[in-house]
Image: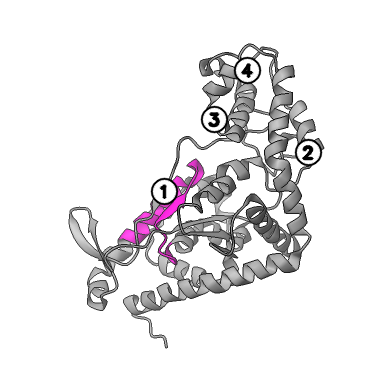
Amino acid sequence: MTAFKPLVFSGVQPTGNLHLGNYLGAIRRFVMLQDSHDCMYCVVDLHALTIAPDPVELMKATREVTAAFLAAGIDAKKHIVFNQSRVMQHAELAWVFNCVARMGWLNRMTQFKEKAGKDRENASAGLFVYPSLMAADILVYRATHVPVGDDQKQHLELTRDIAQKFNNDYSNRIADLGVGVEMMSGEEKVNGFFPLTEPLIEGPAPRVMSLRDGLKKMSKSDPSDLSRINLTDDAETISKKIRKAKTDPEGLPSEADGLKGRPEAENLVVLYAALAETSKDQVLAEFGGQQFSAFKPALADLAVAKLAPIATEMRRISADTAYIDSVLKDGGERAGKLAETTMKTVREIIGLVSS
């Protein structure tokens, strides 16, 4: 092999109540990437176990994320859509990576510190080694690219560190078996089995904030449903939430600098720009000087035009659980074959006996 085959991998955790932030920050990008790349999109239900979800709700949320993928336009026949737990090789490679990763690396992960809070001794071991499983998700398919937002950059850097250490530790064995790609590791050439996965970052990813507080991210956990636009909201609900979105008494500025110190105003402008696939400057060139009483209806119309068809299709697909399960089963079988090809070689590299 002279090079790694280009492949995009990404996953979404099934935690329920997918919202506009999930769509703009992840799912819409997934749809765009499938036109130019081979893609694998995974519902990472094993990751969800770190928060001890209700089993019935976990299954429901797994199907909901799958329905969102399909409703948004992901082609499950051309690409692969599956849930993580169907492919046991994810967990198998995660254990190998737990033995490759260093405690110091995992200790530096800021998401663990944030999620564990002050009572770190009571946090699950699964939450601590979550990044090793994420690395396995990507590398069990030897994926070369991952679309990431700001909150996942550190985990992808760890994935690269794990891949590089594995390649370095087993470079001679990989060369003897003839299963690697010649790569640079620092100033030395090594025979690498795993790629150093690259992030796919196309411009500033929209950071979608709460409709009730422009300083907080839009979140499913916010007690106020008015704080977010759910992907299942109908046209009337979308319009209502935008009309009620928090703003300030000033009108819209003509330039982006005029949004400084105005988080709620900036959030609505960012939403319009993201949905229209344009820039804040272009939005303000059109609406600058107007009041929110004029801007909100325009934003509501745009949001409904973009999101209502997805919500309608998502509700239709969600009602057919047999179809969703068939998509996941087919995707899991296809993903499993790829994953087993990788793991068969990994076992041979590290010295595990398997038939």
Q: Secondary structure at mark 3?
A: loop
Mark before the other along the chain sequence, 2 or 3: 2
Instruction: Read off the residue under disc 3.
Output: 278
Where is residue 98? Give x, y as percent.
Answer: 43, 65
Where is residue 306? Give x, y as percent.
Answer: 67, 39
Q: Which residues are magenta?
A: 139-164
Q: CB atoms at circles 2 and 1 under 8 Å apart?
A: no
Crowd band around label 2 with a 10 angstrom C-alpha radius: few (<14), some (14–19), many (20+)? some
Of labels 4 and 1, the one closer to you: 4
Of labels 2 and 1, the one closer to you: 2
Near-viewer residue (38 or 50): 38
161 falls in the magenta region:
yes
Identify the residue shown where x is 37% and y is 76%: 345
Near-viewer residue (2 or 176): 2
Instruction: Read off the residue under disc 2.
Output: 235
Amino acid bearing label 1: Pro
Mark before the other along the chain sequence, 1 or 3: 1
Instruction: Read off the residue under disc 4.
Output: 287
Q: Is residue 130 rendered to the left or right of residue 71?
A: left
Picture disc at residue 199: 1
Spatial CA distance of label 1 from label 3 is 23 Å
Spatial CA distance of label 2 from label 3 is 22 Å
Query: Would residue 118 be visible to someone looking at this image?
Result: no
The quarter of the rendered structure image containing the C terminus is: bottom left
Mark before the other along the chain sequence, 4 or 2: 2
Spatial CA distance of label 2 from label 1 is 35 Å
Spatial CA distance of label 3 from label 4 is 13 Å
